[in-house]
Image (cartoon, rainbow, N blue to C red):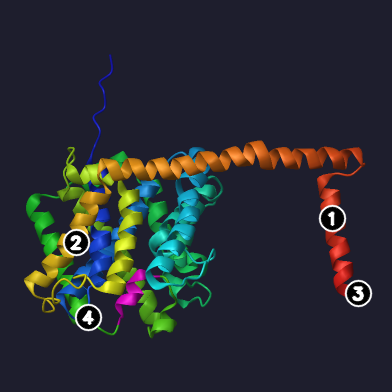
Amino acid sequence: MGEIKQRDYVFDTFRGLCMWCIPISHFTRMAGHFSHDSVSGVIYITINIFVMQAFMFLSGYFSKKPEKSRQIAFKIFLWPYILSIFFFYGVRTLLWGHANLYFDQPPFAMWFMFALFLYKLFQKNYIKVPHFFAITFVLYLVAGCIPFLTEYLSLGRLVSYFSFFFLGYYCNAEHIAKIKCLKKWQSLVLGIVLVGISIYLAYGLTGIPVEWYLLRRPGAEIGVVWYVDILMRFVLFVLGCAWLVLMFNILPGKDNYLAYVGRNTMPVYIFHLVVRQWIKKHGITMGFFALPQAGSPLYLLLILGLASLCVVVFSSKPVSKFYDFVVDGLYDIFMWVINHIVLVIFGAVEKVLVLAGLGTVDWLCRQKTAAEQKVED
């Protein structure tokens, strides 16, 4: 009899760590004492150097079946994205008294879900293109120089993070085993070097705004010269890969709490954004006490503590079950309406058109022609 393959929890742990970092990053920026050349700047830059890159890499790694990826793309990624548009519209309205309903600009951090939907929907097609990773990498390097790669439909991020998704897709278990070859002292040295680089980027390279590390807009819009943008993107790619190597070498492969969080990321991802909006309006202290001095241990502990509280609460079983119940329940209702009402209506219309000697395409063409003639008249 064959041996039962033991699950490697390093991937869940890695995802859980990344999820823990997301609210830390957001709260660091919103806490009230943020500046580029500070400890907060070091934390923010470090997280944005590798966390979303790691999320994309892990998503690509577990997308080895393109046909299955296409089948689940709508339910797993686009459906929560659609719900989030209305959900966060309600949140903004309640907090601020007004809000705009956008469908072409993903709310808050939901660009990630929209990007994964597109990556997985068309994966079956683009993996057949020769040298496609090289194409995505070149596009990544020059994305900051292309004016229309902005926050509209998250085009800037769609292009900028695609190469990490594709890198994960091409990576297999043997590659991971080779990556996990560093000795403890080597991992320690690599970690010190990477943290040192983050410190330099925060304190010594203030000419690159922290906004740039999000890779969501052209460099020219935030004052970064095109050749510096390309060079820094290359540096960022190398740093992102180095952080991946470090994490795979230091994170445990056994089940643990971070691995549990990594299996319940979506509620944390969604609900911590509500807290982020609350902090934006009321401050991180909620008015209960004065904001601690910038860079003080109490100030940093406040950020870390609130972020950790969000992770613990929103990844808990009651919240996770509630999230699944709402999202899956609404999906089932939506599909029932599509299958039992919308398709039935369209089927009836199709039959009427057939009886009249028309096909749906013919009828639509006639409607289009009539509309064009009306405009001309």
Which comes sooner in the sequence, label 3 or label 1?
1
Task: Report whether residue 10 is seen.
Answer: no
Q: Mark 2 and 4 residues: CB-CB less than 8 Å, in contact?
A: no
Counting from the top left corner in percent of width and height, residue 187 is at 13, 55
Q: CA gap, disc 2 to disc 4?
A: 20 Å
Q: Earlier in the sequence, mark 4 or mark 3?
A: 4
Examine the rendered structure and indicate whether residue 336 appears above or below residue 222.
Answer: above
Task: Please name the residue that numbered disc 4 is placed on.
Answer: 35
Span of residues in magenta: 208-215
Q: CA distance from mark 4 to mark 3?
A: 60 Å
Indicate the amino acid at tag 3.
Answer: Asp
Name the element at disc 1: helix
Pointer 4: residues within 10 angstroms few (<14), some, or many (20+)?
A: some
Q: Is residue 195 left or right of residue 239?
A: left
Q: Which residue is mark 3?
A: 377
Q: Residue at x 85, y 58 (%)?
A: 367
Q: Position of residue 90 (x, y in %)?
A: 44, 62
In the rendered image, the quadrant that contains the C terminus is bottom right
Of labels 1 and 2, earlier in sequence is 2
Residue that lies at the very extreme toward the top in this rendered image: 1
Q: Nearer the viewer, residue 342 or 257?
A: 342
What residue sits 11% from the left and 64% below the top?
192
Residue at which label 2 appears? 306
Amino acid on which the number 1 mark rests in the picture: Cys
Q: Are marks 3 and 2 in contact (CB under 8 Å)?
A: no
Membership of 16 in magenta stretch? no
The residue located at (30%, 45%) in the rendering is 319
Residue 365's label in the rendered image is 1
Pick the front one: 56 or 143: 56
